Image: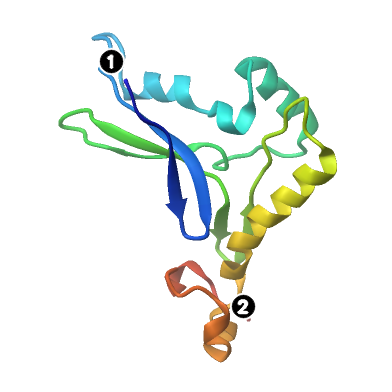
Amino acid sequence: MVEDFMSVRTRGKVQHLGSSVTGILKSDKDSFDALNVLFPSITASGVPKKAAIEVIESLESSPRELYSGGIMLIDPLSNDFEATLVLRTVFQDQDRQWIQAGAGVISQSLPDREFTETCEKLGTIAPYLVSQQVRTILPNRFDTDVSASLIAPRP
């Protein structure tokens, strides 16, 4: 069942249209079968899904890994789970940090506008790559609702 169909969801400075989907799995299916159907999300790939993924894989120089995948919570006792789509994300691996965002390209898309929109999306998360030292020196320049533990100090 689709609940809250295309409701506006605000996350910091960003707004998205989102829907909640609930259901009961067939007895021969489990949470991972559902995830295989849901991810990668058509929001981040396109339709028809299989063809869109093939085009993306042929054009992009590296795999998306977690970007456009899902993060989930699974209750092993009840088999209930919640999943959310990973978009506009700050990643960190030891001393390496990066951000990732994308555009929803369709046949009517204008390449320059899509590029600008992607830059705007990246601009909402780019400040979180700034080192803790800079945040201390310029405390009013950055949102304070993000934990400093997400930002590794640069040497």
Q: Quadrant of residue 11?
A: bottom left
Coloration of the structure image: rainbow
Q: Position of residue 8 (x, y in %)?
A: 45, 43
Q: Position of residue 30 (x, y in %)?
A: 30, 19
> Which residue does the image show at 82% across and 37% down from the upper left?
110
> Which residue does the image show at 52% across and 85% down from the upper left?
139
The quarter in which the N terminus is drawn is top left
Query: Alpha carbon of mark 2 to alpha carbon of mark 1: how far?
Result: 47 Å
Q: Which amino acid type is shown beneath numbered disc 2? A: Arg
Q: Position of residue 85 (x, y in %)?
A: 48, 39
> Which residue does the image show at 67% across and 35% down from the upper left?
104
Above or below: residue 143 compared with residue 46:
below
**Residue 14 in sight here:** yes
Closer mark to the observer between disc 2 and disc 1: 1
Most foreground residue, 26 or 112: 112
Give the number of the disc on residue 154.
2
Q: Which residue is mark 1?
A: 25
> Which residue does the image show at 60% across and 61% down from the upper left?
124
- Disc 2 on helix, strand or loop? loop
Image side of residue 89 versus residue 1, left or right: right
